[in-house]
Image (tube, rainbow, N blue to C red):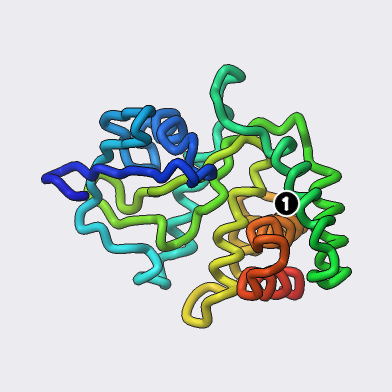
Amino acid sequence: MLAGDSVLKLNAPSHHEAEHEADALAFWNGDGAVRLLARDDERRALLLERCRPGTELVERPDHEVDAVCALLPKLWGEPPASAPFRPLADLAEGWAEKLRANAGRLEPDLLATALDTFSTVDSGARALANQDLHPSNVLQAEREPWLVIDPKPLVGERELNGVGLLRNAAWRTDATPVRGWLDALGSLGLDRERLRAWGVAHALAWSYGGTDSGIVDAARAIRDA
C-alpha cells in the first residue's frame, strides 16, 4: 500500500523466509536498501521508504551488473552475534533432509552437488546474505541510484547473495547470462565455484523437493554455465 513517501508492507505468517526482513533493513539503515521507517512485529507490518521513480532494475538490463556490484559490498556486512538472523548452516541441514526424501525426483548429479554443498557449509561464516536478491527486487530511487527491497535474510557465506541473481539469470534470455553473473560476482572477491554450487543447491532447496520443474531447470542451467 502506497501513502505519499511511504509504503506499508504486510508479510503473511506463512512467509518464513521474510521473517527477519525488518531486522535486515534496520541493520543496513538505508545504505543500499530502502529505509525501515517503522515496524509492528506482531502484525508483521513494515513502513518503508518509497522509491521514486521505482523502476525495477529488471527493466534496465544494461544497468544490472553495475548496479548490483555497487550495492552488494554495502549489504554483506556481519551483524552482531545477538542479531536474530537464522544461520545458513542450520537451514542447510533441513534442506538436505528434504532433498534426500525426494531424491527419486532429482538428477543424481544435481542432487550430489546440492548435498555436497550443504555438507561443506562454513558454519563460522557470519555475513548477512539475501536469498532473494535479483533485478526485480532492486528499484530506482532518488536518494541512491538503486535500492534493494524485499530481502530474505540469513547469516552465512557471502556467496549465498548470488543465488537469486543466478536463478533469475537462468530463466531470462534478455539480460546478463549466468556465466556473466559468475564473472561479475567473482570480480567482487566471491568464490566463483562456491557461487555456482550454492546456486544449484539453493535452487533445489526452493524447488519443493524437486516438484517445481522451472526451478530445477534453473539449477541445471547454473550447473552447466
**Any part of residue 199 in sight:** yes
Element under disc 1: loop
Image position, residue 149 (x, y; %): 38, 48
Image position, residue 147 (x, y; %): 35, 49
Quarter occupied by the C terminus: bottom right
Image-based side of 139 in relation to 137, left or right: left
Image-based side of 141 in relation to 198, left or right: left
Q: Is residue 173 above or below residue 161?
A: below
**Any part of residue 179 in sight:** no
Q: Would you identify the image quadrant in which residue 187 lies?
A: bottom right
Q: Which residue is pictured at 27% across the width and 29% down the height?
A: 38
Which residue is more in the foreground, 27 or 98? 98
Question: Which residue of the protein is positioned furthest toward the bottom in this rendering?
Answer: 173
Image position, residue 145 (x, y; %): 31, 52
Question: Mark 1 Cα within 10 Å, few/some/many (few <14, many 20+)?
Answer: some
Image-based side of 117 in relation to 129, left or right: right
Q: Which residue is pictured at 54% across the width and 23% down the height?
A: 83
Image-based side of 38 in relation to 96, left or right: left
Which residue is more in the foreground, 195 or 112? 112
Q: Would you identify the image quadrant in which residue 56 lies?
A: bottom left
Q: Is residue 21 above or below residue 124?
A: below
Q: Which residue is pictured at 72% across the width and 66% down the height?
A: 210
Q: Which residue is pictured at 30% across the width and 44% down the height?
A: 9
- The residue indicated by pointer 1 is 191
Amino acid at circle 1: Asp
Image position, residue 82 (x, y; %): 57, 17
